[in-house]
Image (tube, rainbow, N blue to C red):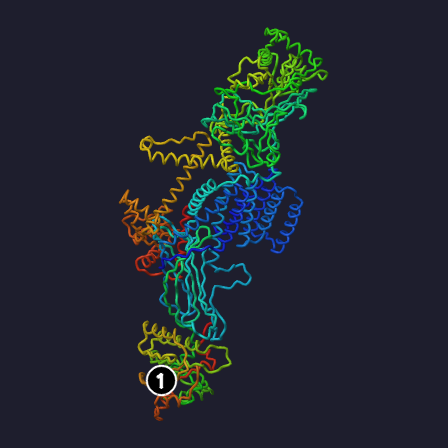
Amino acid sequence: MSRRRIISITSDGYYYLFVLTFIVGGALLRQVNLLIVLAGVMIGLMLFNWRYVVTSLGHLTVRRQLPKHVGAGEPFAVDIVVENGRRWLDNWAVVVEDVVESLTFKSDADAPGNNQPAKPRVLIPHVRARESGRGNYRCRLHRRGRYQFGPLEITTRFPLGLIQARRRADQREELVVFPKLGELHGEWRNVVERKMVGEQHSQPRRSVIEGDHYGLRNWSAGDNRRWIHWRASAKLNELKVREFEQHTSQELALLLDLWDPATQTNLAIDPIEYAVSFAATAIVDACHQNARRVTFAATGESDFFKSGCPSTEFLQEVLSNLAVVQASPANRLPALYAKVVSESSPTTRIIVISTRSVEFTRLFEAAGMTSERERPARLAQLAWIDVARMDWSNLFELDEV
Amino acid sequence: MRIERWLQYNIALMAMLGTLLFGMGHPERSLKLPLLAAFVAITSVIFTDGLKWFQLNRLVANLFALIVAAYTLTRFHLAELAGDKLLEIANLLAYLQFILFYEAKGQRTYSHLMVLSLLQVVVAAALHLNLVAGLILVVYLLVATSTLMYFFLYREQIRVEHGDRDPSAPHARSNASSAGSSNKNGQRRNVQLIEFSTNVEPAVARGTKWNGLARHIGSMAAVSFGLTVILFYSLPRNDENQWQGAPGAVKSEVGFSDTITLAESDLIAQPNRAVMRVSFFDHETNEPYPVGGEPYFRGAVLTVYENGVWRHPAHQQMQATGNPLSQNVRPGMVRQEILLEPSNDVKLFAVFPVYSIRDDRKGVSPPQPNFGQGEVARVSYDGHQNLLLRSIDAAASGGQFRYTLNTTAFHEGRQIPVTAYEMFGDNHRRLTKIDPSRFTKLTALAKEILATAGIDPSIEPFNAWDAAYAMQDHFRTSDLYTYTLDFRDVRRDASIDPIEDFVSNNRQGHCEYFASALAMMLRSQGIPSRIVVGFRGGDYNIMGDYYQVKDKHAHAWVEAYMFPNQIKDNFNLHPDVTSSRGVWLRLDPTPLSSIDEAEKYQVTLMERVDQVLDYFQLLWADYVTGFNSERQKESIYDPLAMESKESVLSMLDPRKLLQGSQPQASSTVGRVGWLLGAAIALLGGTLFATYVISRVRKGAPSSTLGRLIFRVVQFVSPRLAQWLQTPPNDRRRAIRVEFYEQFVTLLARHGITRGRHQTQREFAHAVASQFLATPSERDLVDLPDRVVDAYYRVRFGGQTLSLQENETIDQSLVRLQSTLSARLT
């Protein structure tokens, strides 16, 4: 903590001085004794205020207690602890000002001029001698990224607010804010379990039926014709398809492609943030569903690859990456895709959440997968979600910030 | 209670006291404005601030303010005297406060109310405030300090909760730093990037005992008082610019009349109102001069009697006597210091004869032979009418008036009955004037008295001295006369002179009748005589060694002129006086029984209290409101210089050092001055020592003076120097967890305390078992364990509680408090 104190007169102090000057002037010019008394008292009060603020900051130390990690949009409390090292003198009305600044959005063109550091303040009414006082402020960081807290500035104007003493504690800490999590809908499960046919899934799916048959349902567009239960359909005079018990434990590979610029869209959306939140929610969901193995890869300004069994550490590492991942115009997706494919088993479901659309043929070629024989299997393994082109609210919904 | 509510109470009190001060200094001493202020302050605190039933719209309030300003400024313009203009300004300040009180309050309103109240007190300070007002001023300053502190806390609360902007501002933003972000489904909009909030109120309510602030207010008051005393008494005064009070301000009429009209028919009241305070000092030693008996303070001299009225003659009818003020000081003089209460009369009172206090022996020549407040406070002597006068301006100032004169009237502690003045021939004729046809019985009575005394006026030299005393004794000792102030049953014979009636028919009267009868009796026998009106005696104040003279001490007596060859006892008057000029012999015919001696010497408790209060009033007048350059010199500078000089001499002279030194100043002024000087020196020394110690304890003193002092301390006491250099051990501190402290305090209030052998956990279990035993408290069984869990996590685990956990614990403690409170009821 800096030992340098900055003593200054507050705006109230200047106002007080103005009135005092008026009284002192009257007292001296006309020798009005009671005005001299009044002026003396006022000068005394001001000197007392000055002396008090000068001495009171001398033995104060301040520290901040931050949570380890928070999610974007989640409220949390930041505790400020002030310790008074004096033997006898209590401290009153100590104000600690913190500075909260986004490091991620510092040079972000997305937020020009809006990224002013926030300066929350905490009033700690009373810190007894040799004890500590505690206060907190509630904070909500609406966007993912790295945030810097600090430096702390401790000020006191007690007891009259005429003179202020400030002291800076160069305590800077970083807090990683995970992406905001949304809500996955039932259709997402279909995608994960290869039931969904999107525009990128015009190719026939694999014929392998996984799981045990347990019931019938109405046919819907996109259902594999092989699943049609012809006998029941004939009997009921409408198409019925067989439903199979799902495997709860499977392998999932999630690939986040943050292409910048994202595909131009007339929707007022921020596709990059949407994609990041989508990916984060999907990873959290996969870990909660006890997937057998989860692979996460992200491409943007830098590539990230992580594969393993779901665990807290795994999740935190992925979310930490997602907190800071940035879009990039560099096309490193094919290489990363190839890595994901090479590291995954053939049954692994690969879902790409992207801000663009690509032709799979070109992707495969760029990834070095030129074999025509394997192409159908690759296609069946892959699901492509272009967040910029379509409304995916049937899969994922992000609450209003 | 909310800080803002305390602030409102303080401001209301401040306004009431400020207006009361102004009302006390107002010429009319009217309570109308203070009562109105009290009404406005109280109703606004209840109905405007508390219940919010009535709040003036800002526009309407401004309109009212404009009307009030226009009204008072018009009156200001019409007022002729500066004092009246000042009063109009104070009225405007009061009216503006009244309007602001009924507005919805914010930072701006509070600060305006404080400043307006302060300015009102500034105006009041320029008026004449007595001791009671001074005490109220002290209370006001305490309340103002408290208000300032609460205003600071209120401002600080707003600053923390809302930032530096005013929350009442129409375009106040929320606490957030914003950036482009997205809403549902990523729809982009400009939202806040960082949002934060701080709610100070719970922290204030939970963690603070604001009553500890009283200690700070006390400290501030003490420090400010010390600094004020130093500033006030050390600031050089310039009497030429000294404020004389608002002209046209209050004028308290003194119950003294310079004519006598013998025509009372009712009960004469004896008001207890103070007229002046008189102290006597030995001019040589500066000691208080003990006076035996009751001193006579002369006011006016009346020589002309016509139809029951005594008056002094027209100015040109009397030849002037010499001006005693121009005479030099004489050995054995007694100094009389007189503080006259506010009066618009120019006549002054003193024990005669009077002399200037100019002391040629010392080569010191005071600027004027008069000592009042400022250059207009001049004292002069009217030799034609034998009057001591002050200037009209001094009388019109409305303040107290101080003057100091010497007198030779005392010998061995008693006022001698003769005064020496020249009398010219023309005056002799007037002073023996009597119409024998109107005073046949009185003349006959005079002859009878002289015959009884064996004095024959026809034999030269006429024994006027004994004749005068014989006539005086006739009135004082005879049972024929009765002293009374009740004339309701007295029926004077209108066909004869009242004095003739007094000596022959209705022998009842007060001092004026007795004095008149004696004066005329003396004249009937050819002895020049005159009536003197003034005051006799006063209530002696033991604390302050002074006489407090009141209206009830007004008196009339007689002075008879004795030619040099008629003087029988010159009472050690200066030979020059008696040889050539003759003397005035004071005769007081009023019977002694008119004064209840027993009552005079029995001082009741109330009178003692009154004396103490009066003494403080005198100190207030001397050392606060009337403190001027002269008093500063004699009370502060001179004693300090003397003490310093003696100290230096004592240090140089080991014998004196061993004997010690006693303060030499023994007069009231000297004593108080010495005490003030000592207090200032002590305070200054303490402050300096504190400063030096604090500098030294912070590290090696950097200044030359600091180093020098430290070296001296090191030389005198190496251990003290070592202690000074030891930095305070600031690491020995225990970290307390507030919510657990609160938990323990709550339980302790209800008699549940942790034993020294118990851990926190054991204590929690013990408390839980107590709760379990009481059906109404069974809900709380889990609470102690949860609190202790959290305590262990914070205290020993170094963890922090989440927001939800903090709130849960807060709620639990509130529940615990309410349940335990219910136990009491």
Q: Is residue A234 above or below residue A318?
A: below
Q: Position of residue B774 (x, y in %)?
A: 37, 50
The quarter of the displayed image where residue A94 is located: bottom left
Question: Chain for mark 1?
Answer: A
Q: Position of residue B119 (x, y in %)?
A: 55, 47
Q: Compare residues B76 and A60 and report the one nearer the observer.
A: B76
B598 relative position to B439: left or right: left
Residue B24 seen in the figure:
no
Q: Compare residues B206 and B495 and report the one nearer the observer.
A: B495
B208 relative position to B72: left or right: left
B521 relative position to A77: left or right: right
Instruction: Say which residue label 1 marks.
Output: A337
Residue A109 seen in the figure:
yes
Q: Is residue A188 above or below residue B551?
A: below
Q: Position of residue B682 (x, y in %)?
A: 39, 39
Identify residue type, mark 1.
Tyr
Q: How many marks?
A: 1
How crowded pointer 1 is (Cα within 10 Å; few <14, some 14-19, many 20+) is rated as many
Image quadrant occupied by the N terminus of chain A: bottom left
Q: Compare residues A398 and B187 and report the one nearer the observer.
A: B187
